[in-house]
Amino acid sequence: MAEPILRVSPDAAALAEAAASRFLLEATAAVEERGRFLVCLSGGATPLGLYRVLAASPYRDAVPWASVEVFWGDERLVPKDDPENSYSQARDALLDPVAVPVANIHRVRSTMSPSAAVADYTARLRAAARATRSAAGWPRFDLVLLGLGRDGHTASLFPGSPVEQTAPVVAVMADYDGRPANRVTLTPPVFDDARRVWFLVTGEGKAEAVASTLQGPDDPARWPAQRIRPLGGELSWWLDPGAARLLS
Ligand code: 6PG
């Protein structure tokens, strides 16, 4: 596995601009090479800054949005118009403003039961795998965006959750920040297959989780983001000074 690339920006706004610039490069290259750009979005507040920069000039007009396919790394099982729903957050901040074709948006059916939502999303991943000639039961994402909770969770992989997960999609119950408890999440085998994985993390409140994940003892049960090691892909941590504060 390649060493994580640390990209520390002066502040969250500069981080969003730098990430948007790289997003444009990667999307353009992927579409030129393979005709599409497969991106797996994250929920939470941190990526909103990036989504908003991408939804504005020049990225709104420069990114080949008609060839961008969108999935989510996890989703909260609340109605799609619930403000806590990660799909609707990205739809409002980015997907609607840049007019990503509806057929390219592969959201979790969040009003299904956990087991039905897992089965449905697993089938969607398998269909995308077939369409992109991926031998796995999921597509090889060109870009996976992930956040990090203060407790060290990423996507909906929480401390204490099973480390070894072979199924691409699992249902979990979580208690974090008053956010919805019932979720489905992709698992490390899917994330590790990606061409690039970007963690976007800002704020002093994340400093301990960042340092423990990146420089602490190997303890993937306690620090789930340690489970994500893209085998043949790039792993980047986009940080502001607050989140990077405890890194040596
Ligand atoms: C979610 C995300 C979750 C998020 C972290 C950090 O659905 O909430 O998948 O893993 O990235 O909780 O959230 P913030 O960016 O809001 O701090």
Image (cartoon, rainbow, N blue to C red):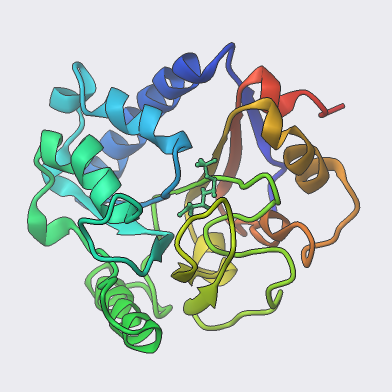
Left/right of residue 4 with respect to residue 143 in the rendered view: right
Q: Which quadrant, please, contains the C terminus?
A: top right
Q: Is residue 182 above or below residue 219?
A: below
List the single residue furthest toward the right: 217
Residue 2 lies, in percent from the top left, at 69, 47
User: Is residue 56 or residue 45 the one in the foreground?
Assistant: 45
Q: Quadrant of the N terminus?
A: bottom right
Q: Which is more toward the observer, 91 or 232?
A: 91
* Residue 32 against residue 135 in the figure, above or below: above
Residue 206: percent from the left, percent from the top? Answer: 68, 36
Query: Which picture quadrant has residue 73?
Result: bottom left
Horizontal and vertical percent for residue 226? 73, 56
Tell whether 159 sits left or right of 191: right
- Look at the picture and state if 232 lies above or below 2: below
Q: Residue at x 29, y 69 (%)?
A: 108
From this viewpoint, is residue 33 visible?
no
Closer to the camera, 81 or 162? 81
* Image height of 128 relative to 203, above or below: below
Q: Residue furthest front?
A: 178
Write the residue at 13% across / 24% down: 61
Q: How many marks?
A: 0
Which of the 4 image quadrants contains residue 75?
A: bottom left
Q: Residue furthest top?
A: 10
Which residue shows up at 45% across the image and 62% down it? Answer: 180
Q: Quarter of the image holding residue 235?
A: top right
Q: Is residue 44 visible?
A: yes
Task: Give residue 195's position: percent from left, percent from top.
Answer: 47, 51
Q: Is residue 245 left or right of residue 74?
A: right
